[in-house]
Image (tube, rainbow, N blue to C red):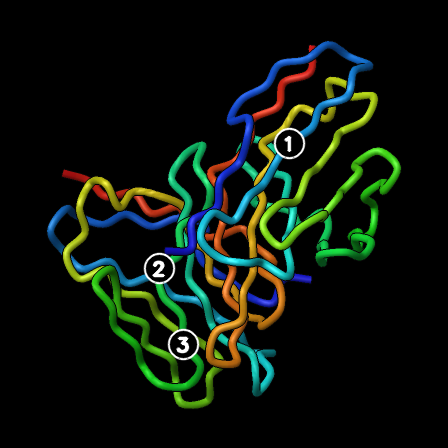
Amino acid sequence: DAKTTQPPSMDCAEGRAANLPCNHSTISGNEYVYWYRQIHSQGPQYIIHGLKNNETNEMASLIITEDRKSSTLILPHATLRDTAVYYCIVGNNDMRFGAGTRLTVKP
Amino acid sequence: GAVVSQHPSRVICKSGTSVKIECRSLDFQATTMFWYRQFPKQSLMLMATSNEGSKATYEQGVEKDKFLINHASLTLSTLTVTSAHPEDSSFYICSAGKTSGGRNEQFFGPGTRLTVL
């Protein structure tokens, strides 16, 4: 069962912010929100995770709504190398991947 | 830190042969390792979860006798595809888990591309 819903694809102009949404309306109280991305023919790369509070690291920011039913991953200044499939996952013990969002960063 | 390697990165084999894929956590001990399979243009599908020293737990629809998993140590898990057939051609990815601050973290390997002729 898919626990998350993401748009199948998005485009973003190089240098602009990329905002990737994710719905996880059935998230449980102890489940974290994780974001990974996968560049073609590579293993998934960890981006960021959060439980309740917004989080920021060197790669991205994660905004989680107060009811925790949705979140947004923000890449503040997208580059061509950020073109990838982005996966939003909720859980705590294992990572079950949905279809993800294919982000294409265009020059 | 938290590097996971896989070997081989690419393998081509004949139909009917068996192929072993290794997954190693290089700088941490992983009590749990996970195996995924990914077909072209599809998402990763969890195949099985293995804990060190115990039998793997397979997802529904994954044949345990075909996909043998051994998790002999805290840094090594192996997946053996037995009697491989062309339909087993896929990208196989492992991940290793560790607990940090009460939260489970998973680190993924670079994947192994299997082609069965």
Residue A29 numbered mark, or none: none
Return the x and y of residue B1 as percentages of the image width and height. Answer: 36, 56
At horizontal 73% and vertical 50% (from top left) the residue drawn is: B48
Return the x and y of residue B59 as percentages of the image width and height. Answer: 78, 52
Q: Does A63 appear above or below A18?
A: below
- Neighbours of disc 2 within 10 Å: few (<14), some (14-19), many (20+): some
Discs 2 and 1 lie in a common subunit = no
At horizontal 23% and vertical 43% (from top left) the residue drawn is: A105
Callout 2, which amino acid? Ile
Viewer-closest of B27 and A56: B27
Return the x and y of residue B111 as percentages of the image width and height. Answer: 52, 36
At horizontal 35% and vertical 85% (from top left) the residue drawn is: A53
Identify the element where label 1 is drawn.
strand
- Disc 1 target residue: B21
Tell me how far mark 3 sits from mark 2, CA to CA.
11 Å
Callout 1, which amino acid? Ile
Q: Does B111 appear above or below B84?
A: below
Location of residue A38 by image quarter? top left
Horizontally, residue A14 falls left or right of residue B55, namely left
Chain under callout 1: B
At horizontal 47% and vertical 80% (from top left) the residue drawn is: B101
- Neighbours of disc 1 within 10 Å: few (<14), some (14-19), many (20+): many
Chain under callout 3: A
Chain under callout 2: A
- Disc 3 target residue: A50
Identify the element where label 3 is drawn.
strand
- Disc 2 target residue: A47
Evaluate if marks 3 and 2 touch, with contact meaning CB atoms under 8 Å apart. no
Where does the C terminus of chain A fall, quadrant-wise?
top left
